[in-house]
Amino acid sequence: MVVEPIEIVKRIENKYGNRLSYLPNSTETKACLPLFEDADTGILFVYIPEGEYNMGFSDAEYTQIQRLSDYPNISIEEMQPVRKVKIEPFLLSITPILNVHILRYNKLFGKSVEKDGADYSPFFCEYELAKSIANDLSTKILNEEEWEYACRGRSQSLFCFGDSIPSNAELEKWLRWDLSSLTALNCNSFNLYGLFFGEWCSNDFTNTLAQDSDIVTGSKVVRGGGAMFWPWQDEEWVCCLSAFRMPSKDLLNNKAAFRLKLDI
């Protein structure tokens, strides 16, 4: 039996009242972290605890990736230098926003945002629309520091699933587009699913992770990837690296998925 940190639950209930319902026995909970459901949209939010981690692609990770490929097709410079980042606790949607959430959003606000795909597949849109939806729902888009921390789930391995590439059967549970039955899928240690569709972050893209790095004009940061190319033909797994980042100018149709954050 999972014992939930009651003081955290009370703190969140005091802040959000009837908006969020605590789900102590949810089957979607595979980690010992409190889970909540938004009353209006049905979005599930998990508690992400505070922590500190090394952001970026480390020397240790470079050593590990060379065991998988002699010449990995990635821009290592874009993921360095490694720097220590401290993250405060927050609530995060356990999946990217799905088309079914957009249907409920439309009904709630009298909007007519068009979905593209099955109800329980990720919703893709341009950044400004993602930001507008987040604002309407009194939520935020993650910054990339928060995104990488959430993806890693306190690990410093190449991927949130370790330092090696699982079997195709296991990868299917990480990369599946149908997110209607989460109990059949794999999640990371923070109870996050569907991490590999390419997600908007609020930061402007910089050429490196250095604090004074040049900004790529007109590009936001996109994190996560790999599911877009499944089943893989080559080394598309590099897009699943926890430190992987790309400029939005490289997106097809300038559209990506996104998660929503609630401050505590």
Image (spheres, rainbow, N blue to C red):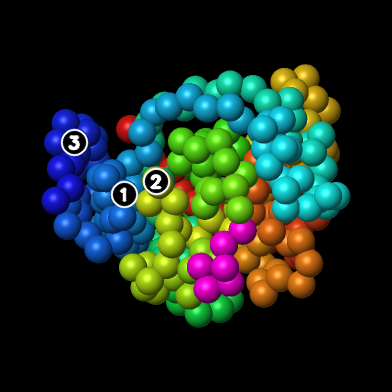
Q: Whole-Å distance between the Cαs marked 2 and 1?
A: 6 Å
Residue 143 visible in the picture: no
Kindly state the secondary structure of the residue where label 3 is placed.
loop
Q: Whole-Å distance between the Cαs marked 2 and 3?
A: 15 Å
Name the quadrant containing residue 212: top right
Kindly state the secondary structure of the residue where label 2 is placed.
loop
Q: Which residues are magenta?
A: 165-170
232 lies left or right of 9? right
Q: Residue at x 73, y 48 (%)?
A: 67
Residue type at the position of mark 1: Ala
Residue type at the position of mark 3: Pro
What residue sits right under mark 2 in the picture? 190
35 to 111, vertically: above or below: above
Report x, y in % for residue 105: 41, 63
Name the quadrant containing residue 115: bottom right
Name the quadrant containing residue 23: bottom left
* Labelled pair 2, 1 in contact (Cβ < 8 Å): yes
Checking the image for residue 5, the label placed there is 3
